[in-house]
Image (cartoon, helix red, strand yellow):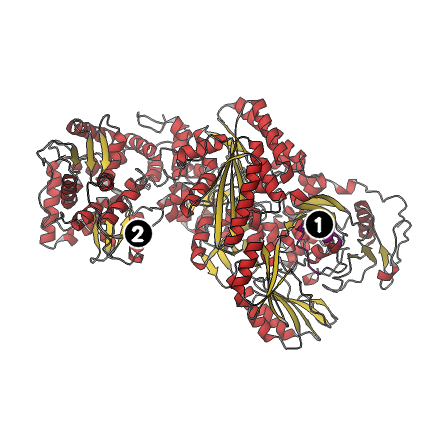
C-alpha cells in the first residue's frame, strides 16, 4: 500500500489531508522556512500516533510533529517533506488539585490550561508570548519560556512526566507526580528536543498556586541603555521579579498603534516589571524596582491600576511579534541569551549592527533573563535584503556568544539556527548530542536535519589520541 | 585485563579511601580525568567516582578497580555575583562554595547539610535542597555541565546563562546518573538571592501552611511541623502573623534522620500524610511537604512499604544500608533498554560506577 | 490566471500577515477542528498561494473559505491589523466568478430575495401563517433552525418603513430586510427611544437590504447595487441608525461621506450617557448578554449594549469573555449546518450556565440561533427592547 493508503487505514480518511492547497497550509510554522509535506495527519491519541510512527519508519519518510505552528525556528516546518503529524486532536486536560499537577494532551492550548486550572487557584507557569495559541506539545518540544519564566524557569522545570511515542512506535510513560524518578532522566532529554527524538502526546505538568497579589509596573526611559542598566541593577540588587521585559520605541509604537492603550510612545524604551507574592512583599519589591528605575533616569513609572490594565499591558507585550507586520511583511529574529551584566554593551552593539546594515530593528525581550529578541523587519521577496538580514543576524549572534551568551533561550534551534550550533559547541559536544539522537531515533525519521548541523556525528573520535598528562604512567 | 592497581607517579593517592585493593587516583585537571577514564576504558577497569564520600552507600555497590577522588578539582571558576550564576569545579565542597556565595547574599540551593559533600557529588546522586519546593530541585539549577565520558571525551552541554534551549540537554541527563553519562567535572549553577527576611514557624498541622502561598519549605519530623518563610521583612512578618504558632527568626534546617537503613521515599505529594501515617514510631523521617519527598531511617528494610510506595506511583530508594538480597532501587524504571543504549554511547566499556544505576545499568 | 476580479485580496493585504498564529484561538472553526485549513492564518495562506499561482481558485479553495463563518473574531486579536473580513469578501468574489456550478440557495437568497420587498413580505406572511396553523415543522430541513428560532410573527405589528416623525428630522433608520419583516418590535422600540431622546426619526421608503449578506457571499455586484440604492435613500441624512449589528457593520464599512452610520446600541448608549434618556435603579434581575460578532469584532462595540442594559436596571451576566461566534453567521446555518449546530449548542450552553432566563442579543441571526437551541422559557430580545420596556415606552 502507499503511504497515504496506510495512513488512511490507520486514522480514517477524515484525518488525512493531501490536497495541494491543504498541504501548503502545513508547509511552514511561524518562521520563514517552508517545506513540502506529502501528507498531513491528525491522530487522536498515543496509539494512533504510534501507528503513524510505524508507517513512517516502514516507508522511510520523515515525520514532523506540529501543534499550533507558532514556532519561530522552523522546528515544525517539514523541510524534508514527509508526514506532518498535527496534535490538536489530543486535547484532554485532567487536573489533579491535590498534587497540583495536570495530565495535558499535546494539542491543548497553553492558555486554555491555565484557564482550566484557575478555578482551583492554580496556573501553568510557562507563558510564551504565543500562549493564547501555542500548544503544550509545542511548549514541551521547544522547552518554551515566556516572561514569567524569570522566576519559575522554563517548561522543562514544569514537566513531571509524559506519555511519548518513541522509535518503533513504542508508547512509554516516563516520570510521574512523585519527585526524582529513578534512572536517567529520559523525559528531560525529550523536553526541548524539537520532535527529533520522539513525539510527546501527553504531559504531566506542575501547576503553581496563583499568588495572592501582583503589581505590574511600566517604566519609561529616554535611552535603551538606561532601561537595560535598570534590568542589570534589579537583578544585582537580589530581586528576582516574576517578569522583567523591555520594549524599545519602534516596538512600542507598533503595538500601541494597534492596541490604543496609550503606551509611552515617546520613550526610547519601556520596561515592564511584575512582582508577585504577599501584598507586603509585592509593595516593597515594586518600590525597590521603581527606585532603581528612577536612579537610572526613568522618565515615568506607572503601576497598573487593576487587572484589566495589567491584562492590557501584557496583551501589548505578547502581541509584539505580530505587530511587526505593520512595519514590513517579514521579520527575522534571534533569541540569544547573554549574561545579565552584559546587557547594556550587547544592546549597544546590536543597534550598531542594525545601523551599519541600514536595517529596521526592533527589540522586545525578556530582559530579566538576558534573553534578547532582536527583530529585523524586512521584505523577504528582495534577495539582496535577505542576504543583508542574515548577515546582520549572524553578526548579532556572534556578538552575543562573544559576551558569553547562548544561541537560543526559548525558540529552539530548528533549521534557522542549526548551522550556528558550531559556534556554540565543539565537535565533541555535537558528536555527543548526535549520539543521543541516534539512540532515540535509529531509523532517522523524527524531524530529520533539525537541531544538529550536518556531519555532527561524523567526528571520528578514534583518530584523536588524547595524551596522558606528563608524569602519569598507567 | 589487569587487576593490578596502576602505578601513579604524580597523581596523589589517599589510601584511606581505597577499598579492596582498589587504587585511588586524585585528578588535578579535566585532562587528568579524561586520561584516567580513557585508560580505564582501554583496560576495562571499573572506576568508582568519589566526591565527599557522602553518598557512597547510595545505589548498587560497585567493586571498583580504581577510586577516582574528585577533591583535586575544587575551584570556583567564574562567579560574577550580579549575573546570579556560578561556574564551579565538581569537586568543590558545597559548604565552602555556599559560604562564599552567602557573603553576597546568594545561594546555590544545594543541600542544606552537605557535610563533606561536593557539588559534583550532589549532582551525580541527584540530591536536592529542602528548599526545592519553592526554588526547584538540583536538576533545574544546573545550567551547564562539562562531562568526561567513559572513553575519555570531554563534552560540554548547556550554557552559562539562565535560560537556554541550545541543543539537547545532556547536562540534565547527568543529574542523578552517577556518572553514567560521563563524570561531571564542572558545572554552571543558577543562583538565587537570599532574602532579607527569614523566619521559621512551628505549626501543629502541615495543612496550616496553606495559609501562606508558596513558603520556602514546609518540613515535618518527629518533632513537629515547621514552615520556613523567606522574603522581605514586612512580607515575612505578615505571613508569620497569619500562621500563628511559635516563630523564631532565621532558618535552622533539620538534619536527615540517621539509622541502620536510610532511604528516600518519593510519592505524589497528596500521599505524604498517608505515608507518614503508615510509618512505625521507631522510624525517623524528614518530610518535605508539597514535594513528595520523605527522607527516612529504620533499623531494617521493609519490602511492604516499598510495595505500597510503588502502588501509589512512588518509589522507595535505599540511600544507605546493607544491600545484600534486595535492590536499593526497587522495580526497574521504564525505558531501561533505551537508557542502556544511551549509556553505551557515553561509556561504551561501562567503566564509571558500573551497575550502580537502577535496572542493573 | 490567479485572480480575475478587482476585488481580490491585494498583495499588501496578504503581506500584512506574518503568520504569528495569534488569530488561531479566536477562530471558532479552528477551535472546532484544530486544523490550519480552518483558521484565518491558513485561509490567508491559501489566498497567498492563489496570488502566487501555486494553487487555482477551485472547489477545494472554495471549500476552505466556505467553512469560514466570517465572524471576524480574528481581527481584533491581530496585532498586524490584517483586514481579514475585506480579504474574505474579495476571495469569495473570486470564487463566485471563477468556480462554476455554485448556484447555491443561500446565494440566491442573499443576492436576490432579500432585495425584493415582495419576497420579503411573502416570507413574513408565510411564516406567520405557518405559526398560526402550527405547521412550522413542515419547513424545508435546511430552514428548520431559522424557523424554530424566529419570533412569533402572529402579532408583529406594522413595518416601520415609510415612517417619519414629522418634525425636523435628524436621524434616519435602516429598517433592514429580515429585521423589517421578522423583528419589527426592535425597529419600533428604536423609533420610540430615539424620539424620547429628542430626535426626529425617518425610515425612508426607497431603502433596501443593506447588502451585507450578498457581500459576505462574494456577490459583489448585487451588494454594490444595494449599497448605491441605499446611498441614494440616505445621503441627505447626517446620521443613519441600523438596528441589526450585521447591517450597521456593513454600512459603516461602506464609508459614506458625510453620513455617520451607527449601530442602534451605540446611538442609544450615547443618548443615555448624554442624559437624554433615563438611567433606572437596579431592578435586581440578571440578564445574560450575547455579543454579535459584527458588533463586537467588526465594530469593536462591547460596552454599549451593557450600558443600555444597566440603564434599564439589569445586572449584566457575562457568558463569554472572548465573544465566540454562535454559529448563525448570516447564512452559515444553511450552508454549514453541522459546524453551525456545534457552535449554536456551545453558545446555548454558555447561556444556560448564566442561570438567568433573560437574554439580550443585538443581532437577529444570533437571536434566532439562540432561540432555536434554548428552551422556550428563555426570553431573548434586543438590548433596546429590554430598555424600552423598562422605561415604560415599550410595547
Q: Residue furthest bottom?
A: B281
Q: Nearer the viewer, residue C63 or C276?
A: C276
Q: Nearer the viewer, residue B173 or C199?
A: C199
**Helix, strand or loop at mark 2:** helix
Label 2 crowding class (10 Å Cα cut-off): few <14, some 14-19, many 20+? many
Is A360 left, or right, of C177 in this rendering? right
* Separation of marks 2 and 1 at Cα, in angstroms: 60 Å
Callout 1: residue from which chain?
A: B
Instruction: Please tell me which residue is depicted at 57% across the width and 40% down the height of the picture.
Output: A292
Is B272 left, or right, of B301 in this rendering? left
Magenta residue check for B109? yes
Name the spot of residue B254 as percent of width and height, x first.
67, 65
Residue marked by disc 2: C347
Residues in magenta, as a range? B96-112
**Helix, strand or loop at mark 1:** helix
Q: How many marks?
A: 2
Magenta residue check for A161? no
Name the spot of residue A435 as percent of width and height, x first.
67, 46
The answer to whether residue C167 shows anywhere in this view is yes
Label 1 crowding class (10 Å Cα cut-off): few <14, some 14-19, many 20+? few
Name the spot of residue B191 as percent of width and height, x first.
65, 49
Instruction: Please tell me which residue is depicted at 17% across the width and 49% down the height of the picture.
Output: C391
Which quadrant holds residue C192? top left
Task: Name above or below for residue A296 compared with residue C327.
Answer: above
Task: Name above or below for residue C233 compared with residue C181.
Answer: above
Q: Nearer the viewer, residue C296 or C366?
A: C296
The disc label shown at residue B103, or none: 1
Instruction: Please tell me which residue is depicted at 45% across the width and 29% down the height of the picture.
Output: A329
Name the spot of residue C21 as percent of width and height, x first.
44, 40
Instruction: Please tell me which residue is depicted at 56% across the width and 64% down the height of the picture.
Output: B268
The disc label shown at residue B20, or none: none
Which quadrant holds residue C171? top left
Amino acid at each position: 500500500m502507499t503511504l497515504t493508503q496506510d495512513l488512511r487505514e490507520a486514522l480514517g480518511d477524515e484525518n488525512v489531508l493531501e490536497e495541494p492547497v491543504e498541504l501548503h497550509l502545513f508547509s511552514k510554522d511561524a518562521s520563514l522556512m517552508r517545506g513540502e509535506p506529502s501528507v498531513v495527519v491528525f491522530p487522536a491519541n498515543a496509539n494512533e500516533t504510534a501507528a503513524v510512527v510505524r508507517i513512517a519508519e516502514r516507508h522511510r519518510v520523515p515525520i514532523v510533529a506540529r501543534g499550533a505552528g507558532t514556532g519561530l525556528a522552523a522546528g515544525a516546518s517539514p523541510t524534508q517533506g514527509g508526514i506532518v503529524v498535527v496534535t490538536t486532536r489530543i486535547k484532554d486536560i485532567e487536573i489533579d488539585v491535590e498534587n497540583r499537577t495536570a495530565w495535558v494532551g499535546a494539542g491543548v492550548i497553553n492558555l486554555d490550561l491555565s484557564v482550566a486550572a484557575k478555578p482551583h487557584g492554580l496556573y501553568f507557569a510557562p507563558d510564551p508570548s504565543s500562549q493564547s495559541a501555542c500548544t503544550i506539545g509545542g511548549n514541551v518540544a521547544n522547552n518554551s519560556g515566556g516572561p514569567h519564566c524569570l522566576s519559575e524557569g522554563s517548561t522543562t522545570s514544569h514537566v513531571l512526566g509524559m506519555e511519548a511515542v518513541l522509535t518503533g512506535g513504542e508508547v512509554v510513560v516516563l516520570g510521574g507526580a512523585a519527585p526524582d524518578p529513578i534512572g536517567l532522566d529520559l523525559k528531560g532529554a525529550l523536553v526541548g528536543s524539537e520532535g527529533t527524538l520522539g513525539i510527546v502526546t501527553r504531559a504531566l505538568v506542575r501547576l503553581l498556586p496563583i499568588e495572592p497579589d501582583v503589581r505590574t509596573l511600566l517604566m519609561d526611559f529616554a535611552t535603551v541603555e538606561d532601561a537595560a542598566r535598570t534590568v542589570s541593577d534589579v537583578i544585582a540588587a537580589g530581586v528576582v521579579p516574576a517578569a522583567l521585559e523591555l520594549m524599545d520605541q519602534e516596538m512600542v509604537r507598533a503595538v500601541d498603534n494597534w492596541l490604543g492603550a496609550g503606551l509611552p510612545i515617546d520613550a526610547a524604551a519601556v520596561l515592564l516589571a511584575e512582582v508577585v507574592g504577599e501584598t507586603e512583599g509585592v509593595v516593597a519589591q515594586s518600590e525597590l524596582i521603581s527606585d532603581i528605575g528612577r536612579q537610572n533616569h526613568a522618565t515615568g513609572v506607572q503601576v497598573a491600576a487593576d487587572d484589566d490594565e495589567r491584562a492590557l499591558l501584557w496583551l501589548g507585550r505578547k502581541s509584539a511579534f505580530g505587530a511587526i507586520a505593520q512595519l514590513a511583511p517579514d521579520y527575522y529574529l534571534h533569541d540569544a541569551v547573554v549574561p545579565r551584566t552584559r546587557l547594556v554593551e550587547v544592546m549597544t552593539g546590536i543597534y550598531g549592527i542594525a545601523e551599519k546594515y541600514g536595517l529596521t530593528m526592533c527589540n522586545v525581550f525578556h530582559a530579566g533573563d538576558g534573553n534578547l529578541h532582536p527583530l529585523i523587519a524586512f521584505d523577504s521577496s528582495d534577495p539582496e535584503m535577505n542576504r543583508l538580514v542574515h548577515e546582520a543576524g549572524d553578526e548579532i549572534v556572534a556578538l552575543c556568544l562573544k559576551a558569553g551568551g547562548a544561541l537560543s533561550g526559548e525558540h529552539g534551534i530548528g533549521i534557522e539556527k542549526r548551522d550556528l550550533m558550531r559556534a556554540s559547541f565543539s565537535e565533541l559536544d555535537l558528536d555527543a548530542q548526535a549520539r543521543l539522537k541516534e539512540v532515540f531515533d535509529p531509523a532517522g525519521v523524527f524531524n530529520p536535519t533539525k537541531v544538529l548541523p550536518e556531519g555532527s556525528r561524523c567526528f571520528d573520535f578514534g583518530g584523536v589520541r588524547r595524551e596522558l598528562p606528563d608524569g602519569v604512567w598507567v | 585485563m589487569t587487576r593490578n592497581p596502576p602505578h601513579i607517579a604524580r597523581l596523589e593517592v589517599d589510601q584511606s579511601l581505597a577499598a579492596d585493593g582498589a587504587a585511588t587516583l586524585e585528578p588535578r585537571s579535566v585532562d587528568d580525568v579524561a586520561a584516567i577514564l580513557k585508560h580505564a576504558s582501554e583496560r576495562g577497569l571499573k572506576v568508582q567516582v568519589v566526591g565527599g564520600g557522602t553518598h557512597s552507600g547510595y545505589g548498587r555497590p560497585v567493586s571498583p578497580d580504581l577510586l577516582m577522588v574528585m577533591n583535586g578539582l575544587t575551584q570556583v571558576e567564574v562567579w560574577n555575583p550580579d549575573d546570579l550564576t556560578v561556574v564551579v569545579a565538581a569537586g568543590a565542597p558545597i559548604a565552602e562554595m555556599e559560604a562564599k556565595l552567602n557573603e553576597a547574599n546568594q545561594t546555590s540551593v544545594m543541600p542544606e547539610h552537605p557535610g563533606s559533600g561536593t557539588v559534583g557529588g550532589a549532582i551525580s546522586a541527584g540530591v536536592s535542597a529542602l528548599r526545592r519546593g519553592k526554588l526547584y530541585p538540583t536538576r533545574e539549577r544546573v545550567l551547564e555541565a562539562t562531562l568526561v565520558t567513559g572513553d575519555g571525551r570531554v563534552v560540554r552541554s548547556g550554557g552559562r546563562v539562565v535560560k537556554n534551549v541550545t541543543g539537547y540537554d545532556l547536562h540534565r541527563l547527568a543529574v542523578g546518573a552517577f556518572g553514567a553519562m560521563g563524570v561531571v567535572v564542572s558545572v554552571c549553577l543558577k543562583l538565587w538571592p537570599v532574602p532579607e527576611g527569614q523566619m521559621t514557624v512551628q505549626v501543629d498541622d502541615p495543612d496550616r501552611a496553606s495559609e501562606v502561598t508558596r513558603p520556602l519549605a514546609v518540613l515535618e519530623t518527629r518533632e513537629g511541623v515547621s514552615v520556613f518563610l523567606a522574603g522581605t521583612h514586612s512580607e515575612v512578618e505578615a505571613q508569620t502573623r497569619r500562621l500563628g504558632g511559635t516563630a523564631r527568626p532565621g532558618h535552622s534546617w533539620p538534619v536527615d534522620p540517621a539509622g541502620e537503613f536510610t532511604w528516600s521515599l518519593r510519592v505524589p505529594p497528596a500521599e505524604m500524610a498517608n505515608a507518614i501515617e503508615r510509618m512505625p514510631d521507631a522510624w525517623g523521617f524528614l518530610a518535605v511537604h508539597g514535594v513528595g519527598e520523605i527522607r527516612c531511617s529504620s533499623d531494617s528494610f521493609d519490602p511492604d512499604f516499598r510495595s505500597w510506595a510503588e502502588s501509589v506511583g512512588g518509589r522507595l530508594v535505599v540511600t544507605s544500608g546493607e544491600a545484600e538480597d534486595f535492590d536499593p532501587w526497587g522495580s526497574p524504571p521504564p525505558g531501561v533498554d533505551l537508557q542502556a543504549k544511551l549509556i553505551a554511547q557515553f561509556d561504551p566499556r561501562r567503566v564509571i560506577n558500573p551497575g550502580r544505576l537502577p535496572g542493573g545499568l | 490566471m490567479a485572480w480575475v476580479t478587482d476585488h481580490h485580496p491585494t498583495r499588501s493585504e496578504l503581506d500584512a500577515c506574518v503568520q504569528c498564529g495569534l488569530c488561531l484561538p479566536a477562530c471558532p472553526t479552528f477551535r472546532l477542528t484544530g486544523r490550519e485549513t480552518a483558521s484565518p492564518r491558513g485561509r490567508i495562506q491559501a489566498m497567498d498561494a492563489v496570488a502566487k499561482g501555486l494553487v487555482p481558485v477551485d472547489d477545494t479553495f472554495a471549500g476552505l473559505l466556505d467553512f469560514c463563518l466570517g465572524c471576524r473574531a480574528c481581527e481584533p486579536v491581530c496585532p498586524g491589523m490584517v483586514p481579514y473580513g475585506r480579504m474574505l469578501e474579495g476571495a469569495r468574489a473570486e470564487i463566485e466568478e471563477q468556480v462554476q456550478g455554485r448556484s447555491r440557495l443561500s446565494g440566491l437568497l442573499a443576492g436576490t430575495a432579500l432585495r425584493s420587498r415582495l419576497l420579503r413580505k411573502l416570507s413574513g406572511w408565510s411564516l406567520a401563517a405557518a405559526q398560526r396553523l402550527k405547521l412550522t415543522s413542515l419547513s424545508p430541513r435546511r430552514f428548520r433552525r431559522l424557523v424554530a428560532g424566529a419570533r412569533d410573527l402572529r402579532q408583529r405589528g406594522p413595518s416601520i418603513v415609510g415612517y417619519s416623525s414629522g418634525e425636523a428630522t435628524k436621524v434616519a433608520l435602516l429598517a433592514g430586510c429580515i429585521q423589517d419583516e421578522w423583528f419589527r418590535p426592535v425597529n419600533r422600540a428604536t423609533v420610540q427611544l430615539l424620539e424620547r431622546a429628542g430626535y426626529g426619526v425617518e425610515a425612508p421608503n426607497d431603502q433596501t437590504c443593506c447588502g451585507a449578506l450578498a457581500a459576505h457571499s462574494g456577490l459583489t455586484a448585487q451588494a454594490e447595487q444595494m449599497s448605491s440604492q441605499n446611498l441614494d435613500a440616505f445621503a441627505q441624512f447626517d446620521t443613519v441608525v441600523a438596528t441589526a449589528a450585521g447591517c450597521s457593520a456593513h454600512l459603516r464599512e461602506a464609508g459614506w461621506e458625510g453620513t455617520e452610520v451607527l449601530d442602534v446600541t451605540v446611538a442609544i448608549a450615547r443618548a443615555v450617557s448624554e442624559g437624554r434618556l433615563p438611567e433606572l435603579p437596579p431592578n435586581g434581575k440578571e440578564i445574560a448578554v450575547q455579543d454579535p460578532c459584527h458588533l463586537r469584532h467588526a465594530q469593536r462595540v462591547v460596552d454599549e449594549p451593557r450600558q443600555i442594559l444597566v440603564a434599564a436596571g439589569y445586572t449584566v451576566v457575562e457568558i463569554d469573555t472572548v465573544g465566540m461566534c454562535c454559529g448563525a453567521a448570516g447564512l452559515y446555518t444553511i450552508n454549514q449546518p453541522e459546524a453551525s449546530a456545534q457552535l449554536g449548542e456551545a453558545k446555548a450552553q454558555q447561556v444556560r450556565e448564566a442561570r438567568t432566563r433573560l437574554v439580550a442579543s443585538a443581532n437577529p441571526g444570533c437571536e434566532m440561533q439562540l432561540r432555536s437551541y434554548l428552551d422556550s422559557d428563555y426570553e431573548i430580545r434586543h438590548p433596546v427592547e429590554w430598555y424600552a420596556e423598562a422605561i415604560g415606552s415599550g410595547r
